[in-house]
Image: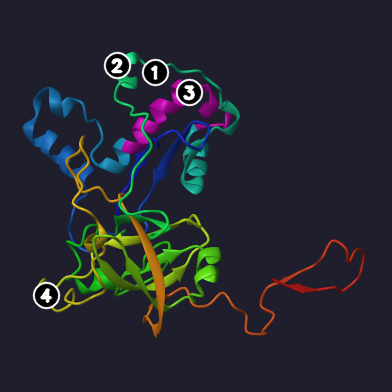
Amino acid sequence: EDWGDDVPNPGVGYPARTLNQPAVAPFFDSKSAGDVFISLAKKLGGRLSDKFKSENFAEHLKAVWQDQFSKNGAMRSSALTFDDFWLKTLKNGGFFQPGAATRKSISVSSRSAADIKEAKASFEGSAASYPLHLTLYAHAAHRDGVGANIPWMQELPDPMTSVVWGNWIEINPKTASRYGILEGELVTIESPSGKISAPAYIYAGIRPDTVAMPVGQGHKNMGRYAKDRGDNPIKLLPNAIEERTGTIALNSTRVKITSTNLSGDLVKTEGSTRELGRNIVQTVSPKAGGSARHKEVV
């Protein structure tokens, strides 16, 4: 429902500034945060009001980008007029400058270097008894579990796995093959501190020596939608706190996994990656050449 822009943290290798526009009209008679601030400034009056020439946040955002356009030569060279640039940027979701990447050297001050520990990271449990590292992370929808008793939050598919109404453990395909684990099987995860169970999600994006789980499920008394929904992976962690932040050390233990040979009731919306003989995806092999009708199913 809202307008907005952002300058992402360095990582893509070149300057970027993103821009988002509303995908739907407001469902209620509500205002975005930007419109609220502008309305408050207008009511307060004085110098604060003078800073906002626009009547709403959408106009203010466009005015800010127009000012940047007038100062940034790369922006001006990408379009004939600002209106052309604005429409192009809205379509692309932002302004990106791949050709402007530069390599710079940096130095770390002695004060900063003093905070960087040279000691290797330590994990609870021996590598022989617990061969896999465990990584826990906040759930994309209800974060640490605060929204676990809200039905539509439970129904919201996870953006990476598409799993709903529960949690899961992410396992690399090579690791799953080594332990004889199939997707959807109920897996037992055990650390020196505890043991839980979760359905396996086979995921090629995780390291073979690591498994991962979202936190936020496994409540016992939070309400009808959260109660007994999955298991709580915090049980696997030792009583360890990160010194500088004072928070629970989420990546502090090793685990071992075993299959129970039972169904884990993994509910997801992504469907299956198997074609089941239907030849949905087809490619033409470079070896076929010319007018050959060689097909490969991938």
Kindly identify the amino acid type of the residue bearing the numbered disc 3: Asn
Q: Dot 1 corresponds to which residue?
A: 108
Tell me, yes or no, whether the two marked residues, 4 and 1, touch with CB atoms within 8 Å: no
Label 3, label 2: how far apart the Cα atoms are: 36 Å
Please check the rendered image and state whether residue 217 is part of the magenta-colored stretch, yes or no: no
Sequence-wise, the earlier of marks 2 and 4 is 2
Q: Dot 4 corresponds to which residue?
A: 223
Q: Secondary structure at mark 2?
A: helix
Q: Dot 2 corresponds to which residue?
A: 111
Residue 211: percent from the left, percent from the top? 41, 60
Tell me, yes or no, whether the two marked residues, 2 and 4, touch with CB atoms within 8 Å: no
* Eye-nearest disc, 3 or 1: 1
Image point (9%, 29%), residue name: 45
Sequence-wise, the earlier of marks 3 and 1 is 3
Mark 3 crowdedness (10 Å alpha carbons): few <14, some 14-19, many ≥20: few
Q: Secondary structure at mark 4?
A: loop
Mark 4 crowdedness (10 Å alpha carbons): few <14, some 14-19, many ≥20: few
Q: Dot 3 corresponds to which residue?
A: 72
Kindly identify the amino acid type of the residue bearing the numbered disc 1: Val
Tell me, yes or no, whether the two marked residues, 2 and 1, touch with CB atoms within 8 Å: no
Please check the rendered image and state whether residue 80 is part of the magenta-colored stretch, yes or no: yes
Image point (56%, 74%), residue name: 273
Kindly identify the amino acid type of the residue bearing the numbered disc 4: Gly
Image point (29%, 75%), residue name: 165
* Eye-nearest disc, 2 or 4: 2
Label 2, label 4: how far apart the Cα atoms are: 49 Å
Residue 6: percent from the left, percent from the top? 36, 38
Q: Which residues are magenta?
A: 61-81
